[in-house]
Image: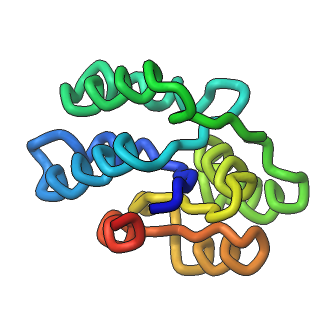
Amino acid sequence: MTTQEWVVDTWVLARADPQYEESMEAVTLLCLILRNQRIALDHDGRIEDEYQSQIRRVEHVRIWWTRMVSTSGKISHRDGNLKARHRRELVEAGQIGDTDGVFVSVASNAAPTKYLVTEDGDYSAHVVSYLQSELAVNVLSLAAALQTIE
């Protein structure tokens, strides 16, 4: 299995909580990433800041995160600043939130797969289409990510 970079939206970490129907799928994805893959974060730590609320709240996420940060080569850092043209089209036009823009930018710089795993409601069909055509970002649902990673 080839090691790939994944950008994992905070939505996935939140869904690892057993109260959610998708919790087993979210935990499975996190475990598969821990075993054979790596994640991409931004240089400025904004994604990690987003993660912290879930790391404190969800035991599975806390264990996963501890193992990710303690294992060499599991975390890459990428530019989290969207280029002005994409920022205007997506963030300033109200298509996605400012924090989502960081995830998008990191995914657009994640080599070579550009996977962004999320089911956040901000990622409308228009946004997903734009990300694919303009930035070559592959927005994957939890189910699609599990099919892709296995």
Judge from the rendering whether residue 5 lies leftward or rightward of residue 117; answer left or right.
right
Judge from the rendering whether residue 45 lies leftward or rightward of residue 86; answer left or right.
left
Vertical relation: 47 (above or below) 40 = above
Please identify the quarter of the rendering in which residue 53 is found: top left
Question: Could you tell me which residue is drawn at 51 percent across and 44 percent down?
Answer: 38
Residue 2 % position (x, y) = 52, 60
Vertical relation: 50 (above or below) 125 = above
| Residue situated furthest front in the rendering | 1
Q: Which of the pair 94/138 is nearer the observer? A: 138
Vertical relation: 116 (above or below) 67 = below
Q: Specify how the rendered protein is coloured.
A: rainbow
Residue 21 % position (x, y) = 12, 57
Residue 101 % position (x, y) = 67, 49
Please identify the quarter of the rendering in which residue 98 is found: top right
In which quadrant of the rendered image does the C terminus lie?
bottom left
Question: Could you tell me which residue is drawn at 33 percent across and 63 percent down?
Answer: 142
Looking at the image, how many numbered discs can be counted on the residues? 0
Question: Could you tell me which residue is drawn at 90 percent across and 53 percent down?
Answer: 84
Residue 32 % position (x, y) = 32, 51
In which quadrant of the rendered image does the N terminus lie?
bottom left
Judge from the rendering whether residue 48 lies leftward or rightward of residue 83; answer left or right.
left
Please identify the quarter of the rendering in which residue 71 is found: top left
